[in-house]
Image (cartoon, helix red, strand yellow):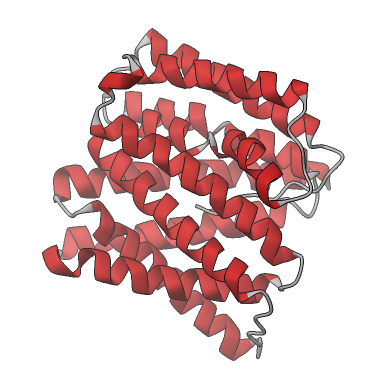
C-alpha cells in the first residue's frame, strides 16, 4: 500500500510540474496574462466542485467564516503571485519560491495557533533564508519584480496554510474547497477582466489543460496521502523543485545557474527538516 502512496504522490509532483510548464507556454508563446490563466484554473476547479456537490449531494456548512475567507483570499493571492512569477521569471525559480511556504508557516503560526518556533526550527528557517538569498542571486535591496512576486507567493501561501489550519478545526474539507474555488473565481475574474485577451484554439486548450492538470495533481496527492504519512508526502511533494528544474532546462532551454541549484537544494533540505520537526503533528498540505 505504501508503494501506491509513493507512486500517486510522485505522479502529483509530475502533474504540478507540468502545470507550471503549461503556464509558462501560455504566458510566453500565447501571450495570455498570468491572472487570466489563474481564472481558468479556478473556474474549472469551481465547476468540478459544483458537479461534486450535485452528484454526491454535498452540503456547504460554514462555521468559521473568517478562517474560510482568509484561506480563500490568501490561497488565491498565492496562486496569482505564483503564476505571475512563472510569467516574469523561470519556472525553476517560481517553484522554489512557492515551495518556501513551510518556512513562512513556521514563522507565522506562533502568532495565530498554539505552535511555537523552537531553536531547531529557527535554524531551519535561517537555512531557508540563506537558500533564498542564493536563488535571488543579488542583494535583497535590488530584487527584480519576478523575485519579489515569487517571495510573495511563498509568504501568502504560508498565510493560506495557517488559515487552513484554523478552518480545519471547525469546517469540513468540502466546505473549505467550496469557499476556496468560489471566492478564488470571483477575485481572479475581477483581476483580469480589464485586460482580458480572447484566446485562440491553441491557447484555449492550454488554459483548460492548466485546470485539468491542476485538478489531477490535487486528486493524486490527496489519494496518495491515504497510504503514506503527511511528512513523507510533504518531502516527496517538495521534490517538485527538481522535477520543474529538469523540465525548464530540457524543454524550455532555461539556463540553470549554480546559485539557483545550490539555493534550491538548501531550501529543499530546510523544508525536509521543518517537516521532520513537525512530524509529531498533523502536517497540512497546500493546494496550488
Residue name at image x 42 percent, y 68 percent: 184
Residue name at image x 59 percent, y 24 percent: 268
Q: Position of residue 113 (x, y in %)?
A: 73, 51
User: To which quarter of the image does residue 158 belong?
Assistant: top right
Q: Is residue 173 left or right of residue 157?
A: right
As drawn, 119 above or below 185: above
Q: Is residue 251 left or right of residue 126?
A: left
Q: Position of residue 230 (x, y in %)?
A: 76, 44
Residue most toward the front?
Answer: 111
Q: Nearer the viewer, residue 80 or 14?
A: 80
Q: Is residue 175 left or right of residue 45?
A: right
As drawn, 46 above or below 245: below
Residue name at image x 72 percent, y 26 percent: 121
Q: Nearer the viewer, residue 120 or 202?
A: 120
Q: Position of residue 23 (x, y in %)?
A: 31, 48
User: To which quarter of the image does residue 276 belong?
Assistant: top right
Amino acid at each position: 500500500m505504501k508503494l501506491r502512496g509513493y507512486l500517486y504522490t510522485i505522479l502529483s509532483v509530475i502533474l504540478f510540474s507540468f502545470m507550471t510548464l503549461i503556464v509558462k507556454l501560455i504566458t510566453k508563446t500565447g501571450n495570455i496574462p498570468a491572472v487570466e490563466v489563474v481564472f481558468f484554473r479556478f473556474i474549472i476547479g469551481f465547476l468540478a466542485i459544483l458537479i461534486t456537490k450535485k452528484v454526491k449531494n454535498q452540503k456547504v456548512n460554514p462555521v468559521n467564516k473568517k478562517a474560510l475567507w482568509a484561506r480563500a483570499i490568501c490561497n488565491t493571492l498565492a496562486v496569482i503571485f505564483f503564476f505571475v512569477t512563472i510569467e516574469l521569471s523561470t519556472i525553476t525559480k517560481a517553484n522554489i519560491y512557492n515551495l518556501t511556504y513551510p518556512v513562512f508557516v513556521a514563522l507565522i503560526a506562533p502568532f495565530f495557533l498554539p505552535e511555537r518556533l523552537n531553536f531547531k526550527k529557527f535554524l531551519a528557517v535561517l537555512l531557508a533564508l540563506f537558500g533564498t538569498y542564493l536563488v535571488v542571486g543579488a542583494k535583497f535591496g535590488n530584487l527584480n519584480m519576478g523575485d519579489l512576486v515569487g517571495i510573495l507567493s511563498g509568504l501568502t501561501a504560508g498565510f493560506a496554510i495557517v488559515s487552513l489550519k484554523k478552518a480545519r478545526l471547525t469546517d469540513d474539507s468540502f466546505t473549505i474547497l467550496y469557499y476556496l474555488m468560489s471566492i478564488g473565481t470571483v477575485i481572479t475574474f475581477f483581476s483580469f477582466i480589464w485586460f482580458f485577451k480572447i484566446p485562440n484554439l491553441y491557447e484555449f486548450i492550454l488554459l483548460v489543460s492548466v485546470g485539468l492538470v491542476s485538478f489531477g495533481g490535487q486528486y493524486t496527492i490527496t489519494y496518495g496521502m491515504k497510504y503514506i504519512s503527511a511528512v513523507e508526502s510533504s518531502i516527496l511533494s517538495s521534490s517538485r523543485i527538481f522535477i520543474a528544474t529538469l523540465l525548464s532546462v530540457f524543454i524550455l532551454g532555461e539556463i540553470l545557474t549554480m546559485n539557483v541549484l545550490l539555493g534550491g537544494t538548501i531550501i529543499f533540505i530546510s523544508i525536509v527538516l521543518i517537516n521532520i520537526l513537525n512530524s509529531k503533528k498533523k502536517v497540512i498540505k497546500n493546494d496550488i
